[in-house]
Image: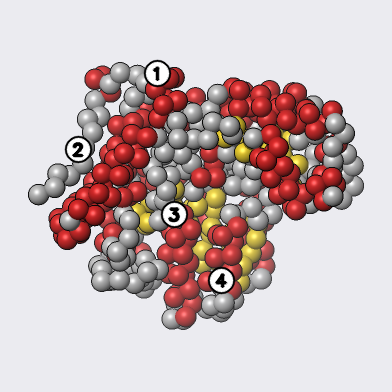
Amino acid sequence: MAPIPKKPKLNHQEQTLISPSEIAAEFSHHDPTIARINNGSFGCCPSAVIAAQRRWQLLFLRQPDLFYFSLLRPGIDSSRRLLLPLINASRLDEISLVDNATTATAVVLQYVSRAFSERRFSPGDAAVMLHYAYGSVKKSVHAYVTRAGGHVIEVPLPFPVFDSGEIVREFRNALNLAKLENRRVRLAVIDHITSMPCVVLPVKELVKICREEGVDQVFVDGAHSIGCLKIDMEEIGADFYTSNLHKWFFCPPSVAFLYCRKKERKEQEEGVEFDDVHHPVVSHEYGNGLPVESAWIGTRDYSSQLVVPEVLEFVSQFEGGIEGIMKRNHDKVIEMGEMLAKAWGTHLGCSPEMCASMVMVGLPTCLGIQSDDNVMKLRTHFREKFGVEVPIYFRPPKDGEIGCVTGYARISHQIYNTVDDYYKFRDAVNQLVQDGFTCAELYG
């Protein structure tokens, strides 16, 4: 019988702290010519975890039947079990592993769509989501809710933003709008960390407001959260919560967890169907509960779901483990963001306490950023001419604003980054300013 990949020992006292040269070696597969300050988009995976993934892949290729019947489910269950204390969930059957946060969103929204089609929800009932929700999530809400007869309310959010109270007020206003229109809010979709622009939202307070206002279900999209900031299912209190493990938690792409809160008996007796949550891909395990359904959706590569033990072994080599990594990433990204803003005479897009491991930094107004197309072309220009990979956000001027910052770069900090990555970006922008460059030149 082929051996199962060895599970790690997690005794921090027995671990030797990893050195800078060893960190560099773990990420030596990264392109050395690129200043990669965009961890937030696709994440990263150290060589040690890639090697563990490869061992799982070879176990399948060596003896597929043994892998399927004897190794796969125990391996996935091991990963799920290790996640429980990291997110403070109390029950293993509340945690499922899926491909990514987009898949998790489909799980939740198909559940809502079925409720409309089965007349458990009424035509015109509402789903509330943020204007800055991730693009695929916004499209999913419209695809599943609007087409099923529901109504979508978008919450406008301010940016730049330096007071979480502004976010809370806008959210309350959206729920009050639903009341004025006599709509029952069946679902609220709330980001924990918005993607573009990136801001950490007060999810615990927003979920509490949903409970006070009678919102049926709350889904928190925490795509960036695990490994980026502390998350606690009991404190947050959402019905559904998802986060990618491949963005900030060092798993290979792609894998996410989806938390589905188990309901109290009183809630079940109120006549609402809570067990009708299924994976979008129907396979042999359909009807056996989402965790089991998700563990087998047909022949595919499940290796990214099996390496959580090795990820925990990797992060245990850092002072403070994953918590220490999160704190250092936060402190460093704020330091680098402030350095860039000072060099360019601009500002950050939010206060440091509203950031995790990413921050928005204003770009000089003389670059002439005037559209979403401008920022996409400018991003390509930074990549191809300067070897800098960084996403850029267009913030349209509001009525009456003159000379305001319209372009913001979203910089990330992960353990492989060095200060030279940010100096390279600083110098690239300074070179464009010195040359009198504007985005109009990208259309020549």
Q: In the rendered view, does 374 fall on the left or right side of 269?
A: right
The residues tagged by marks 2 and 3 sit, at their Cα atoms, a distance apart of: 26 Å
The residues tagged by marks 3 and 1 sit, at their Cα atoms, a distance apart of: 31 Å
Which residue is pictured at 49% across the width and 77% down the height?
116
Nearer the observer: mark 4 or 1; the answer is 1
Q: Secondary structure at mark 1?
A: loop
| Viewer-nearest residue: 371 or 62 | 62
Q: Secondary structure at mark 3?
A: loop
Residue 312's image quarter?
Answer: top left
Q: First in sequence: mark 2 or mark 1?
A: 2
The residues tagged by marks 4 and 1 sit, at their Cα atoms, a distance apart of: 48 Å
Q: In the rendered view, does 195 fall on the left or right side of 242?
A: right
The residue type indicated by label 2 comes to Lys
| Viewer-nearest residue: 169 or 293 | 293
| Residue 6, disc | 2
| Residue 100, disc | 3
Q: Secondary structure at mark 4?
A: helix
| Residue 143, disc | 4
The residues tagged by marks 4 and 2 sit, at their Cα atoms, a distance apart of: 43 Å
| Residue 174, disc | none
Height in image: 255 above or below 279? Answer: above
Q: Which residue is mark 1?
A: 19
